[in-house]
Image (cartoon, rainbow, N blue to C red):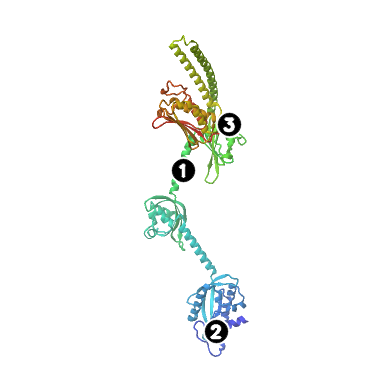
Amino acid sequence: MKNEKNHSEESKGLRLKSGEPGPSGSIPGEAEERFSEIEARYKALFDGSSYCVYIHDLKGRLLDANDAALRLFGYERNEIKSLTFTSLLDEDQLSDAHEAVEEIKKLGSAKKPKEYRLKTKDGGRVWVETDAAVLYRQGKPYAVQGVARDITARKQAEAALRESERKYRTLFDDSRDAIYITTREGIFLAANPALLKLFGYTENHLMEQFNVRDLYADPHDREKFQRKVEKYGSVKNHDVQFRKKNGEEMQCLLTASVRRATTGDILGYQGIIRDITEQKKAEEILRESEAHYRAVVEAFDGLIYICSPDFRVEFMNRRFIERTGYNAIGELCYKALHNLDAICPWCVNTRVFKGETVRWEVQSPKDQRWWYVVNTPIYHEDGSMSKQSMILDITDRKKMEEELKESSKRIKLFAYSVSHDLKNPAVSAYAFAKRLRERYGDVLDEKGGNYCDRIMRASEQIAALVEQIGVFIKAKEVPLNLEDVNLKEMLQICREEFSTQLEARQIKWREPRNIPRVKADRISISRVLRNLVDNALKYGGDDLSEIIIGYTEKDDRHVLSVADNGIGIKAGDAKRVFGMFIRKNSARGIQGTGLGLAIVKEIAERHGGGVWATPRDKKGITFYVSLSKDIT
């Protein structure tokens, strides 16, 4: 009843916006009835409105509010008069609200609806749009009545739209792909920085002076694009050739869709352009590479297959198919290759799928043939792996190797036999000639004495040759006894061995102050140094005045060198001197077997290295011997 009384009092004071006072006397019966009818309608509108209706005095104190307002703000009716309009506002809106109230008081109503963010009882916020007018009593303004519409959902939608537009703008501006919007006629409405960079135009040039048709290498392609996109509503990865500002053409993929008005009419198109010129070149290179690989695989005189980690054959070359008699793709590799029912005992898949390339020789139980196998990992784009096996039939080579081993054994036995058979007669001939010289020297003439001397020298030469043949065979056959060798100490021993000759001929000996220790066979290294120094002393000539020992490191090799300033050799002979029984013409009259440098070469190769020689700038020669650091 109290609420009804309030409404009655407020309605009695309502004089629309005209501000005219009511009758000063009592209201006649008919007028009173009319007034009651208006009051009832007002009350029905006030209470039943889905909009918030409120009344506050000219100072902003709330006098009344309908149920819709109470529900929106969460208050009970008895709490209304403790509130002020401005207490519901955030501080940043107070100034605008005061100005709006003054405007309403001055003009009688608001010029246009206002939007406010108001506080609810539970601390939340709602957005409302209000329109208000002054209420009069006896011709004087005494309150403000307003109608507020809840626009929170709209505000949230607008905020979401702004955020969406911000994200779209960020995506549009920051995208690495070229993005555009055009009219149906081809006029640019928008182009992101990536598109400007791709084509080489400025934004002003593109927007004001350009038609998208001019970007096509063939303008007719634009018409084809229009027909396609308008027929289907969109296109994806449409292949097209565009032209840059500098005239360079590029292969692109165009993804676009139609822009329509609310009426359904086509306004234009929006799309993304991606330059795939480099991708196309890469694809062409890949196709050529695959063709080359295919040609190599088919030309390979062996078997090639690819299998998965679960031993399934994924590929077989033609020769493999010919050997098995059928294409075994999808079958187990050990069954197809070796007719086994279980994984091969020698299988190395575990190592290969860890990234290792594995090489080995195996004899197949299927046909007893020997195969050389190279297994390598293949990495696929999706991260998976396969194993590729290249298999070469080496059965004939194995037979030749066995035959060679047997032949080598026979040759070795023959060499030992010949050495024994040569050495004994040579020693005997030397002894008999020497005894003849000693016992019958007084009866022999000068020629007979010379013959004895020549027999003894020849016998010594034969004995030395037999000795060197034995050394050469040992250098090839005797296992290496690898140990930590002090090269400095080995050089000292070698120098002392030849000290008599060095002093007698006044030959200088030079060697590095510091030489590292090396892993090698001590006896073999001693023989290398001895043979090279002996070679320099024998063939250096009368002008030989110095022997220089050198050491250096080269990648994974120790490199020893022995240089002299003697006669030297021609560059063309530098490779030949390491052959067996090779001697220079200038070596006539000098004792030697022609095996010394061949032995050096054999020792170096057994140590994982090699030998070479180079003439020095002025005179002399340098011999080099390399030894592997990783010998085992």
Q: Which residue is mark 1?
A: 286
**How far across and down, in percent of the image, does residue 178 sit?**
44, 55
Q: Residue 325: in sight, yes or no? A: no
Residue at x 58%, y 33% (from the top left corner): 338
Q: Position of residue 367 (x, y in %)?
A: 58, 29
- Please tell me which of labels 3 and 1 falls first in the chain: 1
Marks 1 & 2, CB-CB < 8 Å contact:
no
Q: Residues within 10 Å of mark 1 (few under 14, many from 20)?
A: few
Q: Position of residue 35 (x, y in %)?
A: 56, 84
Pick the front one: 220 or 65: 65
The type of residue carrying mark 1 is Leu
Kindly state the secondary structure of the residue where label 1 is placed: helix
Sequence order check: which comes first, mark 1 or mark 2? 2
Residue 141: which numbered mark, if any? none
- Residue labelled with disc 3: 364
Query: Where is residue 394 drawn, in percent x and y?
Result: 53, 30
Q: Which residue is mark 2?
A: 13
Instruction: Please identify the quadrant where the C terminus is shown.
Output: top right
Give the amino acid type for the residue marked by disc 3 in the picture: Ser
Q: CA distance from mark 3 to mark 1?
A: 36 Å
Task: Between residue 351 and residue 629, name the one nearer to us.
Answer: 629
Name the amino acid, label 2: Gly
Q: Dot 2 lies on which element? A: helix
Dot 2 and dot 3 residues touching (CB under 8 Å): no
**In this rendering, the label closer to the viewer, 1 or 2:** 1
Q: CA distance from mark 2 to mark 3?
A: 115 Å
Task: Looking at the image, tell me whether mark 2 or mark 3 is earlier in sequence order.
Answer: 2
Q: What element does badge 3 sit on?
A: loop
